[in-house]
C-alpha cells in the first residue's frame, strides 16, 4: 500500500510538472512543432536513466522512492500517447518533414539523454 500511495502522489506531481512545463515551452516557442512534449520527454529520459542507475547501483534511494520517482513521477511527466497524437496530426496535416523530425528527435534525443543519465551516475561512482 505504501508503494502504491507513493506512486500515486509522485504521478500527480509529474503530471502537474508536465502541464506547466510544456505550457511554458509552448508559450515560448509556439505550437507549430510539439516542443513542449519533446522537452518533457527529453527531461524524463535523462531523469529515468539517472534515477534507475542511482537506485540500482547505490543505497541512496529506497526501492519505494525509486519506484515512486520512475513509475509515478516520470510516468506522469512523460507521455508517449501525446507524442503519438501530435505526430499523427502533423502527418494528417501533410507536414511530413515536421513529423519525421519529431519522431527522430524524440527517439534519438531521448535515448541519448537516458544514456547521459546513466553515465552521469557511473562517473560519480
Image: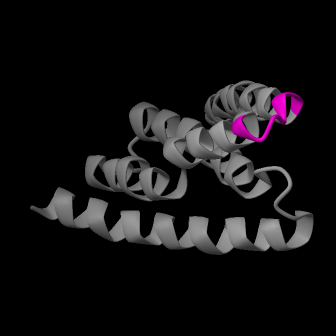
| Foreground of the two, 61 or 41 | 41
Above or below, 95 against 61 in this view is above
- In this picture, is 87 found above or below 18? above
User: Residue at the front extreme?
Assistant: 93
- How many numbered marks does the figure carry? 0
101 and 107: which is toward the camera: 101
State the image coordinates of residue 94 (x, y, percent, origin top left): 81, 34
Tell me which corner region of the image, top left, top right, bottom left or bottom right, holds residue 103.
top right
Q: In this view, does 17 lie to the left or right of 111?
A: left
The quarter in which the N terminus is drawn is bottom left
* Horizontal side of residue 59 vs 108, given as left or right: left
Q: Nearer the viewer, residue 35 or 57?
A: 35
- Percent coordinates x, y for residue 54 in the rendering: 50, 39
Residue 91 falls within the magenta-colored stretch: no
Quadrant assignment for the C terminus = top right
The magenta span reads 92-97
Q: Residue at x 63, y 32 (%)?
A: 114
Residue at 72% of width from left, 47% of height from top?
A: 38
Residue at 27%, 53% in the rendered image: 64
Is residue 11 depicted above or below 45 in this figure?
below
Res. 36 image quadrant: bottom right
Q: Where is residue 37 in the image (x, y as percent from the top left)?
A: 67, 52
Q: Which of 61 and 96 is in front in this view?
A: 96
Question: Would you place residue 112 above or below residue 89 in this image?
Answer: above
Left or right of 49 on screen, residue 5: left
| 96 in the magenta segment | yes
Rendered location of residue 51, percent (x, y): 51, 44
Amino acid at each position: 500500500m505504501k508503494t502504491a500511495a507513493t506512486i500515486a502522489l509522485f504521478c500527480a506531481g509529474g503530471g502537474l510538472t508536465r502541464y506547466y512545463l510544456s505550457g511554458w515551452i509552448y508559450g515560448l516557442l509556439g505550437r507549430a512543432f510539439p516542443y513542449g512534449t519533446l522537452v518533457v520527454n527529453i527531461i524524463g529520459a535523462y531523469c529515468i536513466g539517472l534515477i534507475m542507475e542511482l537506485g540500482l547501483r547505490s543505497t541512496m534511494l529506497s526501492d519505494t522512492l525509486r519506484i515512486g520517482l520512475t513509475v509515478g513521477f516520470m510516468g506522469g511527466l512523460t507521455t508517449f500517447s501525446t507524442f503519438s497524437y501530435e505526430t499523427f496530426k502533423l502527418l494528417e496535416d501533410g507536414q511530413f518533414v515536421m513529423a519525421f523530425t519529431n519522431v527522430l528527435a524524440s527517439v534519438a534525443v531521448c535515448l541519448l539523454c537516458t544514456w547521459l543519465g546513466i553515465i552521469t551516475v557511473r562517473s560519480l561512482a
